[in-house]
Image (spheres, coloured by chain):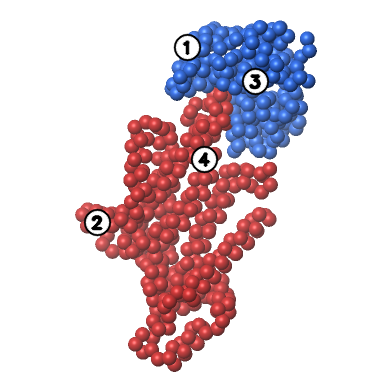
Chain colours: A blue, B red
């Protein structure tokens, strides 16, 4: 479904390539975990896949094929058609990613308003349905709230609702649980699993937290300094890490969470 | 409701403080209205009698209280130098000053919003860079100088302006023509400042995460700007415009001189010169009221824009 081949990204302002030849693929309905420390290039990879990289500031080469279409070759208007419709994105901090002056419901249904001709009432109905899907209590009230009236966990659920409302083929999750506390984090992971199971949405889940990735993803790819150093079955990578960097990452997990072989 | 009452209370308190400080200032600065009024016929007995007659003899607080009571009921006292009721003197001029200030304000809003948005849409381009330079220059020129330049250009060289001030009752069109160039002179540096302010706030907002989210939902840069960033950029600009209102009031005093507009500014300067304090007091309080009103309106507008500023809104 998604196939990234030999992706290179270089910012004009930097010497080193941010992403230096990365290849991976995601099958239909699969969740791929992408892990690595800050600055390893995982977020840049995600932004490139989402078509959100500022092309004036960075140079990309290689290919990003979404159902056979190379996103890197598309012009801005064609990319815009995909954003929010075929590709949904959920970012790290829900508090700053929501427009503080727009009601939550209007933001949840925004992609629908942009890409389809659905009526206002229909959009509202679908948005409330999506808010129900992400298990927000009292979705009708949430619809009319402003972001500052919700908690971080509630907001992140609403962000996920906004991203899945148009039933995208691919959901990019860039550290979606990092800013949340641990119990909320676990709930969000459960929710993502459920959405993947029920709606068959493929996901690219980015995190620096191996433990979180292990709970959600079957397959995992490990990035270091812009390169993919290891990729494979999550259990396999966890229990028999090949690359020294992966071994170090696993060693960095607090012992209580660390998997016992 | 409770918030509105609190606001009103703060408003009234500020007005009382402003008027009291002006009142106090006139007790402290040198210059005696009685000496001024009697001129060459000054004798200590006459001065004493006049003081008695003007109510200048009682203790400070009592005199302030008398004035305040009078002001609230509309009796603002009598001008020393014109021997006319202050309300009548001020009433004749207040319309002109308000019209000048209002026109200036309209010009600022009507011009700076589109120009600011234009520079942001063309950010980094040649047009944006040119406008930034022009802006710097305009900002540096004080309104009285632009005023002198305008009067010379439009009335002496081009003779577009009528030679004398036309009252509204004589010719409404001519009246606004008379006010247009003074208003423009007043507005120009403020327009430049507002454009710069709007540009920098907008550019800052455009780098925020929610704009990236908006783009990720399929908005183009135009929609991200108008649907999301603009509204978020407005509150500081609205506050800035309210402060600008206060600055217009201050500069209009000078510009009225340059363009010979019979407004409060000229009356104020003349009254300060002749220690005609009832007039000064009334004008200062009126101007303060006007400025405070602008601030309050700005607060109300910002509360409409940003729900976090409403009562119980912020957590």
Query: In whole angstroms, how far apart are the C-alphas of marks 3 and 2?
Result: 69 Å
Examine the rendered structure and indicate whether residue A170 appears above or below residue B314.
above
- Residue situated in front as seen by the camera: A153 or B180: A153
Query: In whole angstroms, how far apart are the C-alphas of marks 1 and 2?
Result: 62 Å
- Residue situated in front as seen by the camera: B119 or A108: B119
Q: Residue at x 54, y 39 (%)?
A: B232
Quarter holding residue A4: top right
- Kindly tell me whether residue B8 is visible in this rendering: yes
Tell me whether marks 3 and 2 sit on the same chain.
Answer: no
**The numbered mark 3 sits on a residue in which chain?**
A
- Residue B278, given in percent of the width and then of the height, sits at 47, 75
Query: In whole angstroms, how far apart are the C-alphas of marks 4 and 3?
Result: 34 Å
Residue tagged 1:
A61
Of the two numbered discs 2 and 4 in the rendering, the one whose residue sits closer to the viewer: 4
SS for callout 4: helix
Of the two numbered discs 4 and 3 in the rendering, the one whose residue sits closer to the viewer: 3
Crowd rating for badge 4 (residues with CA inside 10 Å; few <14, some 14–19, many 20+)? many
**The numbered mark 4 sits on a residue in which chain?**
B
Residue tagged 2:
B152
SS for callout 2: helix
Crowd rating for badge 2 (residues with CA inside 10 Å; few <14, some 14–19, many 20+)? few
Mark 2 and mark 4 lie on one chain; the one further toward the N terminus is 2
- Residue A163, given in percent of the width and then of the height, sits at 63, 23
Of the two numbered discs 1 and 2 in the rendering, the one whose residue sits closer to the viewer: 1
What mark, if any, has residue B233 been given in the picture?
4
Task: State yes or no: discs 2 and 4 in contact (Cβ < 8 Å).
Answer: no
SS for callout 1: strand
Examine the rendered structure and indicate whether residue A79 appears above or below residue A128.
above
Crowd rating for badge 1 (residues with CA inside 10 Å; few <14, some 14–19, many 20+)? some
**The numbered mark 2 sits on a residue in which chain?**
B
- Residue A118, given in percent of the width and then of the height, sits at 60, 25
Of the two numbered discs 3 and 2 in the rendering, the one whose residue sits closer to the viewer: 3
């Amino acid at each position: 479904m998604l196939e990234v081949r030999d992706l290179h990204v270089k910012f004009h302002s930097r010497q080193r390539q941010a992403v230096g030849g990365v290849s991976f693929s995601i099958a239909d309905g699969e969740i791929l975990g992408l892990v690595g420390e800050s600055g390893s290039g995982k977020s840049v990879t995600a932004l490139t896949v989402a078509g959100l990289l500022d092309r004036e500031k960075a140079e990309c080469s290689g290919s990003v094929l979404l159902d056979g279409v190379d996103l890197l070759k598309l012009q801005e208007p064609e990319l815009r058609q995909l954003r929010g419709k075929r590709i949904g994105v959920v970012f790290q901090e829900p508090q700053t990613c929501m427009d503080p002056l727009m009601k939550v419901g209007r933001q949840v249904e925004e992609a629908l308003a942009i890409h389809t001709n659905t009526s206002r009432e229909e959009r509202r109905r679908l948005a409330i349905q999506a808010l129900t899907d992400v298990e927000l209590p009292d979705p009708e009230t949430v619809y009319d709230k402003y972001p500052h009236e919700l908690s971080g966990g509630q907001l992140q659920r609403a962000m996920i609702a906004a991203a899945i409302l148009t039933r995208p083929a691919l959901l990019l999750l860039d550290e979606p649980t990092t800013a949340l506390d641990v119990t909320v984090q676990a709930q969000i992971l459960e929710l993502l699993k459920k959405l993947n199971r029920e709606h068959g949405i493929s996901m690219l889940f980015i995190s620096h937290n191996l433990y979180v990735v292990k709970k959600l993803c079957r397959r995992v790819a490990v990035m270091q300094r812009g390169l993919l150093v290891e990729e494979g079955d999550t259990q396999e990578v966890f229990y028999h890490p090949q690359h020294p960097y992966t071994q170090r990452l696993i060693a960095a997990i607090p012992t209580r969470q660390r998997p016992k072989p | 409701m409770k918030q509105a009452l609190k606001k009103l209370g703060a408003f009234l308190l500020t007005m009382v403080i402003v008027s009291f400080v002006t009142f106090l200032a006139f007790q402290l600065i040198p210059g005696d209205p009685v000496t001024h009024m009697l001129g060459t016929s000054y004798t200590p007995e006459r001065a004493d009698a006049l003081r008695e007659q003007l109510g200048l003899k009682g203790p400070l607080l009592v005199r302030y209280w008398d004035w305040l009571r009078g002001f609230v009921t509309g009796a603002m006292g009598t001008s020393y130098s014109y021997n006319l009721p202050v309300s009548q003197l001020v009433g004749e001029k207040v319309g002109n000053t308000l019209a000048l200030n209002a026109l200036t304000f309209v010009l600022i809003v009507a011009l700076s919003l589109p120009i600011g948005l234009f520079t942001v849409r063309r950010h980094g381009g040649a047009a944006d860079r040119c406008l930034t330079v022009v802006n710097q220059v305009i900002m540096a020129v004080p309104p009285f100088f632009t005023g002198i330049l305008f009067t010379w250009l439009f009335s002496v060289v081009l003779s577009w302006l009528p030679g004398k001030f036309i009252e509204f009752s004589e010719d409404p069109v001519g009246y606004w023509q008379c006010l247009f160039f003074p208003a423009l002179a007043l507005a120009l540096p403020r327009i430049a400042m507002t454009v710069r302010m709007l540009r920098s706030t907008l550019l800052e907002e455009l780098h925020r995460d929610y704009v990236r989210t908006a783009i990720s939902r399929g908005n183009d840069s135009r929609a991200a700007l108008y649907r999301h960033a603009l509204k978020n950029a407005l509150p500081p600009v609205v506050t800035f415009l309210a402060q600008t209102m206060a600055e217009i009031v201050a500069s209009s005093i000078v510009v009225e001189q340059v363009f010979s507009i019979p407004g409060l500014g000229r009356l104020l300067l003349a009254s300060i010169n002749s220690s005609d304090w009832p007039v000064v007091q009334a004008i200062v309080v009126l101007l303060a009221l006007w400025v405070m009103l602008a601030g309050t309106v700005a607060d109300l507008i910002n509360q409409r824009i940003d729900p976090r500023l409403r009562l119980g809104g912020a957590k």
